[in-house]
Every structure is written in structure tokens, then in C-alpha cells.
Image (cartoon, rainbow, N blue to C red):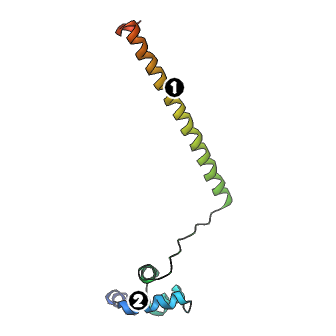
Amino acid sequence: MTVEERRRRRFSEEFRRAQVALYESGQISIADICRLYQVKRENVMRWVKSYGNKPHMEKIVVSFGSEFDRLRELENENKKLLGIIGKQQVELLYQRSLIDMAKNKYGEDFEKK
């Protein structure tokens, strides 16, 4: 079957539902459906998502332990830096309020002195 012929084909909803039912019953795998009917995996996955009764499993990304450790280290550093920024923001607001109080008590020229 040529690429052009595959582009022009359309599968009926009944056919799609039948393939999804076979997949969900465990009689056939997605890879087998793709091979048997020369359909892209993305299309079959879309059929399963649309017509399937079972909740679709999300992809699980497995990474190396060092990547996981690095990610955890970066998250901890991020928390620490956010805490520092928050503390500095509070100190800045406190200093501004002190300056405003001093302006009220000593006049507007307080900053110039």
C-alpha cells in the first residue's frame, strides 16, 4: 500500500470501536493493530482515548537517579531562594514604613538630610 493510498483511507467509527474493544479485552496490542492495518500509532491511541472505556494510562518517564537527585536539589534551592526574597521584601517594606514615619515627624526634607 502506498503512502498516497494510506492518506486517502478512512476508517468507520464501527471499525474503530471494534479495534478498541479488541485492544481493551487484551486480544490484540496497539502495535499489532498498527502493523495489521498500517495505521499510525498516534491514530490508534486517539481511537482508544475517544472510544475506550478504560481510563487511559499516562506515560511514565523514567530517568536516572542522578537526574532525579539534581531535580530535587534544584527544587530545594528554589525554595531557599524564594524564602530569602520573601524575607528581603518584608525588610524593604519595614524600611519604607520607617522612612514614611520619619517624613511625617521631621518633614519632607528628611531624606535630604
Q: Position of residue 38 (x, y in %)?
A: 44, 89
Q: Is residue 81 above or below residue 73?
A: above
Name the N-terminal-most of marks 2 and 1: 2
> Residue extending furthest right?
65
> Looking at the rendering, in which quadrant would you find the C terminus?
top left
Q: Position of residue 55 (x, y in %)?
A: 50, 77
- Residue at which label 2 appears: 16
Q: Is residue 75 above or below residue 19?
A: above
Question: Which one is in front in this view, the residue at disc 2 or the one at disc 1?
Answer: 1
> Looking at the rendering, in which quadrant would you find the N terminus?
bottom left
Residue at 61%, 45% in the rendered image: 76
Secondary structure of the residue carrying numbered label 2: helix
Residue at 58%, 43% in the rendered image: 79
Viewer-closest of 105 and 80 = 105
For label 2, the crowd category at 10 Å Cα-Cα, with few meaning under 14, some 14 to 19 and many 20 or more, is: some
Q: Is there CB contact under 8 Å for labels 2 and 1?
A: no
Secondary structure of the residue carrying numbered label 1: helix
> Residue extending furthest left?
8
Image side of residue 80 versus residue 45, left or right: right
Q: Determine which of the numbered discs, if any, sits on residue 8 in the image.
A: none
Q: Is residue 101 visible?
A: yes
Disc 2/disc 1 C-alpha distance (Å): 63 Å
- Residue at which label 1 appears: 91
Q: Position of residue 53 (x, y in %)?
A: 47, 82
Please state which amino acid type lies under the numbered disc 1: Glu
